[in-house]
Image: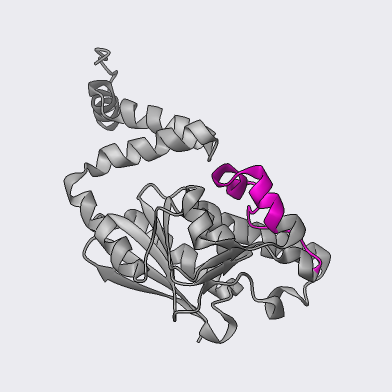
Amino acid sequence: MNEITCAYDGGAAVLTVANEAKLNALTMEMLQQLEEYLVAAEWNPDVRAVILTGAGGKAFCCGADIAEWGPLSPAEFARFWVRDGHRVFDRLARLSKPTIGALNGHAFGGGLELAACCDIRVLAPHTTLALPEGKVGIVPGWSGTQRLTRLLPEAVVKEMALFGRRLTSERAQALGFAADVSDDVLAVAKDIVRSLDDMSPRAGTLAKAMIHGAVGEDRAAAIEALASAAAAASDDRDEGVSAFLEKRSPEFTGL
């Protein structure tokens, strides 16, 4: 099997990368499935958060399936594989709802880039992180040199991308990349989701947008989303819509 599965657990949409025969490597079909589930989670009011994990206990995701991208021409590789992957990863990173990466095992290449798109991460003790693309003659293509460098020190990303060194779960936690290290990452992730019961969904959405604006994650959209939310909550907005539907001139109050 090579697919993304989705299960609902309370307020969490649990997405599982399932391709155990290839250490949960991602195919283009799986990326498309992931995007569809993320769109559904965004629009589903019963979903408070998304948890992303891997099937089995050895790997979270060991990157992109070489059998898929290897035969592509340079133009196809850049135009479809890299750009389409970026689109899906960006959707995960910019989801308005909280996201948790439950890394039940190794996260290499695209798998590490996938984990970096989550808001927080919980790692199993045996999890290691790596950017091994240089060993097959390519470079990180799904934000490993961009988004990941905002989450880890530049020198650490260089260790992995330039020298092929791996990062242990212990060191990842010390560097702030992992919120927790646990033998049962899914249980910890679900427990974190339950804490949202005491939090305002709207406040969380706004806070996430402000934080993303501060670090440059889709800053333009974050600014416009915040301003649009404020405008949409005004009396003027209600009056403007009513006037348009009633085909009359609006009487704005500035409130």
Report the residue at 30% width, 41% height from top: 204
**Quadrant of the rendered image containing residue 199:** top left
Residue range corresponding to the magenta coloring: 137-160
Locate residue 163, reporting x and y percent: 75, 59
Location of the C terminus (image quadrant): top left
Q: Is residue 60 at least partly visible in the picture?
A: yes
In the rendered view, does 177 fall on the left or right side of 37? Answer: right
| Vertical side of 232 occupied by 3: above or below | below
Given residues 174 and 74, the one toward you in this image is 174
* Magenta stretch holds residue 157: yes
The x and y percentages for residue 7 are 31, 73
How many labels, in total?
0
The residue furthest top is 253
Give how far across and how far down residue 64 sits, in percent: 63, 71
Q: Nearer the viewer, residue 189 or 227?
A: 189
Between residue 210 and residue 163, name the one nearer to us: 163
Image spot of residue 55 (x, y percent)? 44, 79
Identify the image quadrant of residue 24: bottom right
Residue at x-position 72% and y-position 57%: 161
Q: How is the image coloured?
A: one colour
Q: Residue at image x 48%, y 63%? A: 35
Q: Residue at x 51, y 48 (%)?
A: 175
Query: Between 21 and 158, which is closer to the camera in this rendering?
Result: 158
* Image side of residue 41 versus residue 77, left or right: left
The reply to whether residue 145 is visible in this rendering is no
Magenta residue check for 81: no
